[in-house]
Image: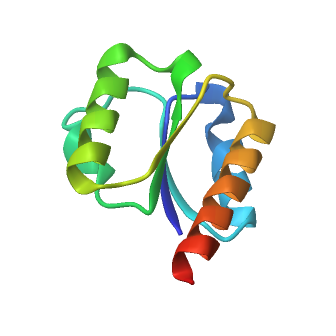
Amino acid sequence: MSIVLVGGHDRMHEAYKGICSKRGHRVKVYTQLPARFDKMIGTPDGIVLFTGTVSHKMMHIAVKEAKRKNIPIVRCHNSSGNSLESILEQFEKELAVASY
């Protein structure tokens, strides 16, 4: 499963990648707003949005792209590693149900 993670702490960048790869997922992590962010999102299986540590502009772009491309999005105020693991579990359960 491919995931785009928007927000979070800069110092947790590698930890987020490690958590996702440990569970067998590909991930792109954006803690800061890059140029042409809407094009960088691509078409992942899901978007994780850490609302407590993301700019309004970045959040707006991610939500707009998710709606436009029909990508599921999960919002979470807490940007800890444990929060990311529980979100990934939720995504995995939803994909398992959708595949039946």
Q: What percent of the width, then of the height, locates residue 82?
A: 80, 39
Q: Residue at x 28, y 57 (%)?
A: 42
**Observer-nearest of 72 and 32:** 72
Q: Residue at x 52, y 22 (%)?
A: 51
Q: What percent of the width, then of the height, locates residue 46?
A: 46, 55
Quadrant location, the C terminus: bottom right
- Horizontal side of residue 6 vs 69, given as left or right: right
- Horizontal side of residue 79 vs 95, given as left or right: right
- Horizontal side of residue 6 vs 77, given as left or right: left
The residue furthest bottom is 100
Q: Is residue 95 above or below residue 9?
A: below
Q: What percent of the width, then of the height, locates residue 73?
A: 46, 45
Q: What percent of the width, then of the height, locates residue 55?
A: 40, 16
**Observer-nearest of 2 and 66:** 66
The residue furthest right is 82
Q: Residue at x 74, y 31 (%)?
A: 80
Q: In which quarter of the view is residue 71 placed?
A: bottom left
The chosen color scheme is rainbow
**Observer-nearest of 73 and 31:** 73
Q: Residue at x 53, y 73 (%)?
A: 98
Q: Is residue 13 above or below residue 58?
A: below
Image label count: 0
